[in-house]
Amino acid sequence: MRLGVHAALVRGTLVAGDVEVDDGRVVDVGRTPAGRGGIAVPGFVDLQVNGYGGVDFLSADADGYRRAGEALLLAGVTAYQPTFITSAEAATVDALRRLPTEVAGPRIVGAHLEGPFLSPERPGTHPLEHLREPDVALLDRLLDAGPVTQMTLAPELTGSDALIARLRERGVVVSAGHTNATAEEAHRAFDLGVSGVTHVFNAMRPFRSRDPGIAGAALTRPDVVIGLIVDGHHLADETVRLVWACAAGRTTLVTDAIAAASAGNGTYRLGDVEVELEDGAAPKREDGTLAGTVLTMIEAVRNLHALGIPLEDAVGAATAVPAAFIGRDDVGVLEPGGPADVVVLDDRLEITTVLCAGEPDVVARG
């Protein structure tokens, strides 16, 4: 099957010509004659999505994952990590046990546990009553319950070193977030194996001239991947540009989406938290605290590109960078022999077609 595109983004480079796919794989790129239907880019990879399409992943069943997956595909997401915010141990264990191993639609690469080992000084929307001090036995119980691929923790908490060591032993990527860590504490955590920061500048120690905190430390470390929410609410445009100036090529777009994403105004659940969504506003708790987003990944790409970031790099922040961060070479790529997880964009960066393992889901057709 030919996609009818005039170019494809292959390993960060636009290659002129059409793309051919067969049996769930990309067969060739640069085929002539080229089509006229936009450009093909890799399917997006979202490492932090709490819910989608009316579904909160902490309480989702198999049908909920199916419905959320269908909605995620419409935004070009072909691989993702369901993210569970801090909740009671039993609720998190149950959610991990319900995580589907095989499901039609976007690939679930594993779970992202955001908590419970977070700073009570920087909880954001995470319920204080469910935060826990570092506890390796509790960590093991969570990891034993289901496939965890990433955990966000506050590395300054006493006992976090043991958590970092255990997570690395078990092949889990460790990210720092909801943290009051100083720059010194952050550097120590990065040296121990923390390899990313979760939604930089949000729910972490502020950057100051003589106290740059974990954000300042992360931006100066070429070995640290920066998670970035570009929804127009969580970060000022200048902040996004600053992050990119420091960390281009190691910045990963995340949506931090909640059930309200692609579902409309109303009241939704984010774990144990009740969240309101009104026209034009970010989702918030009753007390006004930001509570995730309704951002889609294609919107995140467009928003980043609109700030002057080349399209190839903006797409890379939603594909190759997150895939590399979690050590996956089978998602976030478009190349001969690779999986046919492909998004076709028109000249306005609107999605016209999404392929997931070669199966076309036609979103729009001009």
Image (spheres, grey):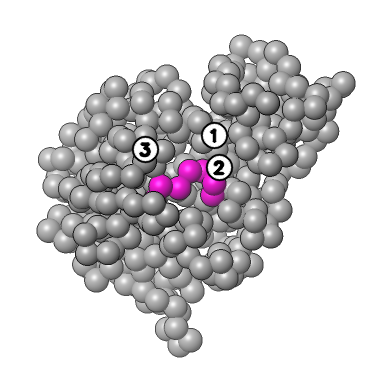
What residue sits 80% from the left and 27% below the top?
36
Magenta range: 293-300
Tell me residue 354's x, y (percent): 58, 26
Measured Cα–Cα span from mark 1 to mark 2? 7 Å
Q: Amino acid at mark 1?
A: Gly
For label 1, the SS is loop
Mark earlier in primary sequence (3, 1): 1
- Residue 211 appears in view: yes
Residue at the front extreme, as displayed: 279
- Pointers 1 and 2 in contact (CB under 8 A)? yes
Residue 263, disc: 3
Query: Badge 3 local density, few (<14 within 10 Å), some, or many (20+)?
Result: some
Q: Is residue 301 above or below residue 101?
A: below
Q: Classify residue 321 as left or right of residue 287.
A: right
Query: Badge 2 local density, few (<14 within 10 Å), some, or many (20+)?
Result: many
Mark earlier in primary sequence (1, 2): 1
What residue sits 18% from the left and 34% below the top?
94
Quadrant occupied by the N terminus: top right
For label 3, the SS is loop
**Residue carrying label 2:** 298
Q: Nearer the viewer, mark 3 or mark 2?
A: 3
What residue sits 36% from the left and 69% below the top?
204
Tell me residue 233's x, y (percent): 44, 61
Q: Classify residue 17 as left or right of residue 122.
A: right
Mark earlier in primary sequence (3, 2): 3
Query: Badge 1 local density, few (<14 within 10 Å), some, or many (20+)?
Result: many
Q: Amino acid at mark 3?
A: Ala
Residue 76, disc: 1
Measured Cα–Cα span from mark 3 to mark 2? 16 Å
- Residue 170 appears in view: no
Question: Any magenta on residue 125?
Answer: no
Q: Classify residue 126 as left or right of residue 280.
A: left
